[in-house]
Each structure stands twice: as structure tokens, then as C-alpha cells.
Image (cartoon, rainbow, N blue to C red):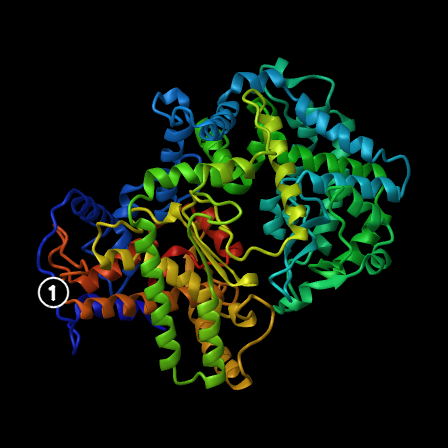
């Protein structure tokens, strides 16, 4: 458990049975010099690794790397992402004069590249966005008003059902208090089912319900909602003003509207399931028929809601899976006691809150100012426009930009070598299961079966769509219409297209091998519900992985990352899902008891760690909430280390496996540099406010404690 002590020993004490390091040559290639320089820049050689390993491996990073003015943190992840975004921009930004050019005569490639560049240019064309004014958003609001005219109180059942269906068709970008989406079935991961789940709050405010209890912040929120309503729907177009509207400019009409909206959200806070009564996922996965749903929520016409939500060709007659049944009866009571006009205003607010960022800045400044109060990012620290546009490209045309990103950055044997590392880690996991004495044979067999069934998506998608095929990508995005001069329309079209694709999947088997991350993302994940791991090309980049790096660097980077994601299949959550991701506790009773006892050690260990929040105040971490991530961090270290050590022992001379020295780092052994590579993975700086929010809401421990834990 005491990872910090183990790392300190590895760095400072000669082991009783040392590994024979015969890779004595110093590599002086350009890549080796760059890798060495990067390590030397990150570490603080004066820090004692036995006292603070994070300080030793990241002290230089913390001193030299600044948090961007438009962010609250910076980390190794974000630096990789920034470099990925730079590459994406070089592909799509024609104004740079070096953007991608299609091969002559390749019509499909021409269409694909044109779609990418049209989306980017529509986002960068701030003059056209300003000229469009607020009308695009006002028009979308009018569509909701037409669907739900709010002529009576309580709300008209037909109008309410139509309005909810309309919001569902707009996609997850506009979450209401009742969303419908397709997903894998918890009981049978090979099948897509329709799921209903609750949300409806602002993401930041909703994650931390205490924000709604802060009266000063709540009043500022009311003022902001009122200002935004008047900005988008008021008589005066703020584009004609020198300054954006402020609370003192707001009329009584819009103040009353805002009060009704926020009062409704306050009641939503009361009934949303912020504190689960149990960690048992089956309690949040109840299949209910339309008749049962209608009985629980008589205010909603579920037959009509399905008709308004799903494409005409999609006929769904199976039960709908509900994420939290008690919510349904509570929301129905709330609907019956809420004036229809307040609901209509709430629906309008959902559209404003989610789409105002797609208008010119003059229209969203009040909302940006409020968000800055919550996030801690200064309101005047606006991100450069191209960053917003790159994010749009990565999100809306993920596989398409991934196709060209991979062509630029994931060359040669990169995917093959990354897969080889992952397969080596899988072999070590299997050996570890066989060597773990407290596992009984039944559990051991089930663990190995699940391990071998993990669906790996590495680098990019190879099915639905095949990201290596221009034709497949052209067909995949065919129905997503992009217009070079209509950024707002492109955004609405994307989310509508994505929602429609999601609903069409209800007639198809679930694809366990889909890439569940953006191809250009410096991120990775494990999907418990179908036992799959996604590691996109965007994360298989320097310094996480490079073909020319010694293996102790690569195993301390991509090795740790991959072992972490695989490890999730066997953590405190993963042990509840079998080899196909079906919900079932596959641990035997005796093994489960031992597992729980050992897990409690992690809960207590991490629960005793503290962070410095605002005012230099100490806050303890939540070892229970972060248990699964802490489990995977620790198992990843063990598996990646053993895998690399075994490879080093198999070729101590370095004839086939590269473990040569790096210039300027000769005093460190290969094993020490493995641990240093691991520690660098968790280099991060955060503002105290952001760190406190992170510790309250994220399932991961703060990075310092991921290194020291």
C-alpha cells in the first residue's frame, strides 16, 4: 500500500537481488536528447523522493509551467492535449497556408477535408456570427414555445410531452429533467436499450449542490439568468449597446421569469439523486414498460414522448431502462405543482444556457462572467478563438479529424508497438492472478476469462466507422450538414445528427469495440458496462509513448496508462461486471470478503491525505469515492513495473529491447527512471479553488496523491 515508501526505496537503496543493467550505452539521437531534456526540466533533484516523490519528479514542472490565463489547472495531460490541438489546427486552418490538401482527383478526400475546414472556418468567422445576432437562438426557443405554449396550469400533458421530445431530438447538448438516450443494457451488454435518466442542472452548479445553498452565489445566478433572458429575448438587441446588459438594466418581467426558473432548479436539486443510497448499479437500472412509466408519471404521455423523440423508422417496444425510479414520482409531483409558464421558461433557459456560447461574445458575456465566479477563471481571460474551434472539430468530427491526425502523428509501427505493450501487460495480469494466493480458483478463472475478453480500441476506430477509410468516414458523416457561414446551425445540426444516430442504434447490436474517446484526446477510459478499453492515438504521444524512447520510459507512460484502464475491470466497480460487461458479482463470497477488507485499506489511506484549498485550509480526500481509481493506479504500477522488469531480464544486453541510458541522466538506473517516468505522468498545477472542486467531484485523487499514494 505504501507506494511512496516503495518508490523511495527503488530510487535510493540497492536491492538485495538487483537487476543486471547492461544497457550502458548513452543514446544521443535527437529523440533521446529531447526526452532527457524533458525529464530534467520536470524533476527537482534536490527534493527527497522518500519524503515527497511528487516534488522530486514534478518540482521543476511546478516551477516553470504556468497555468494558462483561461484555465484553472495545467498538467502533463493538458500539455499533450495542447500539442495535439496544435496539430489539428495545422490540418484544418487554411489561413495558416499549410493546411491539408486532398490528393488530386480524390473526390472523397476532397469532401472530407472540405467538411473539416468548413466547420473550422464557420467557427472562426466571428464577423458572420456577430451579423447573425441572437436570432438563431431566439428561433430555437420559439420552436419549444410552439411545442409547449403553456396555456394552462398545471402543464398540458400533450404539450409537455412534445416539448420533452423536441429537447431529446436536439441531443444531449440540451439536457432537460428527463432525457432519453440509447446505451448498452446492464443485464446484456450486447443489446442497445433506451434509457431515461435525470439531469437538468447547470453542469458546474449541478455537480456541487452546495452551490445552490450559497445565498450570495444563488442571487448572482438569478441575476445572470434574468440578464441572459433579456439579452436573448428582450426588446433591445444588446449588439447596439456599448456595454452588455447588467442586473440593473433588467426589467421586472425578466427578473420574475428568472426567479421562476431558479426556483424550479432549487426543487430539482432536492429530488435529484446526489447521494446514492447504495453503490449497487442494479438499483439504477430498472426496465419499465410504457404502462409502468405512465403510472409513475401521469403528467407525461410516454407514447407521445417516444413518438416525438425517436426517428419515424425507429419503433421501440421494449422496456425503457430508468436510472433512478424514485426520481420519477418526485418529478411528477413537481410537474403537477409547477405553473406551465415556469416550465416553458425553464425549457427556454436550457437552450440559452447550452447554446449562447455559439453566438457572438456580446450575447454571452453575462453568462461567462457568472461561470468565472464558479470556476475561478477570470472573466476577461478568454481563450483564443481557435481553441474553441479546435474543440468543436475534435467533438463534432472526431473520427474524421482522427483519420488525418493519425496520418500525421501515429506513423510506422506506433500502433503495433503500443498494442505489443498492452498485450504484454495483459500477460502479466494473467500471471498475477495465478500467483495471488487469496484468490480462490473459481474467482481466478473468472478473472482470467474477463481479462481475455477485454475489447481493446487502440489508436482509432476500426469499425463503425473504419477510421482508416476515407470512404467509410464520408458515409459515416454524410448526414451531418456543415455550412461554412453558419456556426450556430452547424452546432445544432451536429447534436441533432448525433442524437438521431444514437436512436438508430436501438435496432443494432451494441458495438463493444467502438472507440469511446475522441481520437485526438489525451485521455483513455474503461467502459465497465461492456468490458472495453479505449486508448486513442491522442494519448499515445510523447512523452507518454515514442517508438524511439527506451522501454523504461514507455512502460512508465503508456504502460501505466494502459495497465490502469485494464485494472478497472477488476476494481471495486469492475468486479460487479463479467467478461461481457453484464451486471453480476463474479467474485465468490470468500474472495469478496477478502477483497472488501483489502479495499478498506485504500479507503483509509487516501482518506487521510489532505489538500490545501482556498485560504490555505486543509481538506481531507474522500477515500471511498476515489476507491476504484486508487485501486487501478496501484495495480497499474505493479503490473507495468513487473512487465518491464521481466522484459529487461529477458534481454539484459539490450540487443532487442531498448533500455539504453539518456544523456544527463546517467546517474539514475533504468529502474529509477521507470519510476521517474511514472511520477512525471502526474505533474499538475491547480488553483486552490479548482483543487477543492476537483477533490469534491472527481473520482480520481489529486495528482500529487496519485504519485505519492
Looking at the rendered image, the quarter that the C terminus falls into is bottom left
Q: Quadrant of residue 366?
A: top right
| Residue 35 placement (x, y as % from top left) | 21, 47
Instruction: Give the residue pinned by disc 1.
Output: 653
Find the residue positioned furthest to the right: 152
Task: Name the residue at 70% across, 40% down.
Answer: 169
Task: Name the residue at 16% across, 42% down.
Answer: 30
Residue in the foreground of this view, choosing between 109 and 431: 109
Residue in the foreground of this view, choosing between 386 and 120: 120
Q: In the figure, is residue 612 to the left or right of 19?
A: right
Looking at the rendered image, the quarter that the N terminus falls into is bottom left
Dot 1 crowding, Cα within 10 Å, few <14, some 14–19, many 20+:
some
Q: Secondary structure at mark 1?
A: loop
Is residue 384 something one can see in this rendering? no
Residue in the foreground of this view, choosing between 661 and 698: 661
As drawn, 504 above or below 189: above
Is residue 675 something one can see in this rendering? yes
Q: Quadrant of residue 15?
A: bottom left
| Residue 488 placement (x, y as % from top left) | 60, 27
As drawn, 524 above or below 308: below
As drawn, 644 above or below 690: below
Residue in the foreground of this view, choosing between 344 and 192: 192
Amino acid at each position: 500500500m505504501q507506494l511512496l515508501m516503495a518508490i523511495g526505496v527503488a530510487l535510493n537503496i540497492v536491492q538485495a537481488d538487483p537487476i543486471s543493467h547492461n544497457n550502458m550505452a548513452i543514446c544521443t539521437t535527437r529523440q533521446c536528447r529531447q526526452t532527457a531534456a524533458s525529464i530534467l526540466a520536470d524533476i527537482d533533484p534536490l527534493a527527497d523522493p522518500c519524503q515527497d516523490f511528487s516534488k522530486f519528479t514534478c518540482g521543476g514542472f511546478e516551477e516553470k509551467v504556468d497555468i494558462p490565463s483561461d484555465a484553472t489547472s495545467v498538467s502533463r495531460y493538458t500539455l499533450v492535449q495542447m500539442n495535439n490541438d496544435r496539430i489539428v489546427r495545422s490540418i484544418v486552418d487554411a489561413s495558416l497556408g499549410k493546411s491539408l490538401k486532398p490528393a488530386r482527383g480524390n473526390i472523397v478526400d476532397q469532401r472530407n477535408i472540405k467538411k473539416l475546414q468548413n466547420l473550422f472556418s464557420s467557427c472562426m468567422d466571428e464577423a458572420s456570427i456577430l451579423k447573425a445576432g441572437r436570432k438563431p437562438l431566439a428561433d430555437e426557443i420559439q420552436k419549444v414555445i410552439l411545442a409547449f405554449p403553456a396555456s394552462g396550469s398545471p402543464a398540458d400533458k400533450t404539450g409537455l410531452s412534445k416539448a420533452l421530445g423536441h429537447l431529446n431530438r436536439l441531443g444531449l447538448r440540451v439536457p432537460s429533467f428527463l432525457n432519453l438516450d440509447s446505451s448498452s443494457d446492464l443485464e446484456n451488454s450486447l443489446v442497445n436499450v433506451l434509457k431515461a435518466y435525470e439531469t437538468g442542472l447547470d453542469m458546474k452548479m449541478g455537480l456541487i449542490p452546495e452551490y445552490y445553498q450559497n445565498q450570495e452565489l444563488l442571487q448572482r445566478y438569478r441575476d445572470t439568468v434574468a440578464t441572459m433572458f433579456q439579452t436573448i429575448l428582450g426588446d433591445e438587441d444588446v449588439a447596439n449597446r456599448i456595454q452588455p446588459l447588467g442586473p440593473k438594466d433588467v426589467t421586472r418581467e425578466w427578473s420574475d421569469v428568472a426567479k421562476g426558473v431558479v426556483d424550479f432548479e432549487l426543487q430539482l436539486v432536492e429530488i435529484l439523486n446526489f447521494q446514492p443510497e447504495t453503490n449497487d448499479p442494479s438499483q439504477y437500472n430498472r426496465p419499465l414498460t410504457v404502462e409502468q412509466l405512465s403510472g409513475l408519471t401521469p403528467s407525461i404521455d410516454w407514447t407521445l414522448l417516444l413518438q416525438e423523440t425517436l426517428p419515424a423508422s425507429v419503433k421501440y417496444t421494449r422496456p425503457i431502462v430508468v436510472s433512478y425510479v424514485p426520481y420519477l414520482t418526485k418529478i411528477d409531483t413537481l410537474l403537477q405543482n409547477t405553473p406551465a409558464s415556469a416550465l416553458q421558461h425553464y425549457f427556454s433557459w436550457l437552450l440559452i444556457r447550452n447554446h449562447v456560447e455559439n453566438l457572438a461574445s456580446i450575447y454571452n458575456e453575462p453568462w461567462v462572467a457568472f461561470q468565472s465566479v464558479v470556476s475561478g477563471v477570470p472573466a476577461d481571460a478568454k481563450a483564443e478563438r481557435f481553441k474553441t474551434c479546435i474543440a468543436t472539430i475534435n467533438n463534432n468530427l472526431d473520427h474524421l479529424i482522427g483519420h488525418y491526425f493519425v496520418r500525421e502523428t501515429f506513423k510506422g509501427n506506433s500502433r503495433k508497438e503500443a498494442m505489443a505493450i498492452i498485450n504484454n501487460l495483459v500477460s502479466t495480469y494473467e500471471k498475477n492472478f495465478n500467483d495471488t494466493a487469496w484468490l480462490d480458483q473459481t474467482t481466478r478463472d473468472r478473472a482470467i476469462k474477463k481479462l481475455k475478453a477485454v475489447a481493446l480500441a487502440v489508436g482509432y476506430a476500426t469499425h463503425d466507422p473504419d477510421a482508416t477509410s476515407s470512404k467509410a468516414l464520408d458515409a459515416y458523416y454524410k448526414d451531418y450538414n456543415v455550412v461554412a457561414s453558419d456556426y450556430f446551425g452547424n452546432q445544432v445540426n451536429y447534436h441533432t445528427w448525433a442524437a438521431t444516430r444514437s436512436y438508430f442504434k436501438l435496432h443494432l447490436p451494441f458495438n463493444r469495440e467502438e472507440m469511446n474517446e475522441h481520437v485526438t484526446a489525451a485521455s483513455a477510459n474503461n467502459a465497465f458496462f461492456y468490458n472495453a478499453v479505449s486508448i486513442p492515438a491522442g494519448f499515445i504521444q510523447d512523452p507518454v509513448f515514442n517508438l524511439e524512447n527506451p522501454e523504461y520510459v514507455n512502460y512508465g507512460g503508456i504502460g501505466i496508462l494502459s495497465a490502469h484502464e485494464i485494472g478497472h475491470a477488476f476494481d471495486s466497480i469492475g468486479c460487479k461486471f463479467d467478461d461481457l460487461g453484464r451486471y453480476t458479482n463474479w467474485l465468490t463470497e470468500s474472495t469478496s470478503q477478502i477483497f472488501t477488507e483489502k479495499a478498506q485499506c485504500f479507503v483509509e489511506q487516501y482518506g487521510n491525505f489532505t489538500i490545501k484549498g482556498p485560504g490555505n485550509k486543509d481538506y481531507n480526500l474522500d477515500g471511498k469515492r476515489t476507491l476504484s481509481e486508487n485501486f487501478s493506479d496501484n495495480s497499474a504500477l505493479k503490473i507495468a513495473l513487473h512487465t518491464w522488469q521481466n522484459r529487461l531480464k529477458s534481454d539484459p544486453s539490450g540487443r532487442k529491447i531498448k533500455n539504453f541510458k539518456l544523456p544527463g541522466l546517467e546517474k539514475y538506473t533504468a529502474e529509477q527512471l521507470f519510476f521517474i517516468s511514472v511520477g512525471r505522468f502526474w505533474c499538475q498545477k491547480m488553483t486552490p479553488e479548482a483543487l477543492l472542486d476537483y477533490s469534491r467531484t472527481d473520482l480520481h485523487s489529486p495528482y500529487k496523491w496519485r504519485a505519492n499514494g
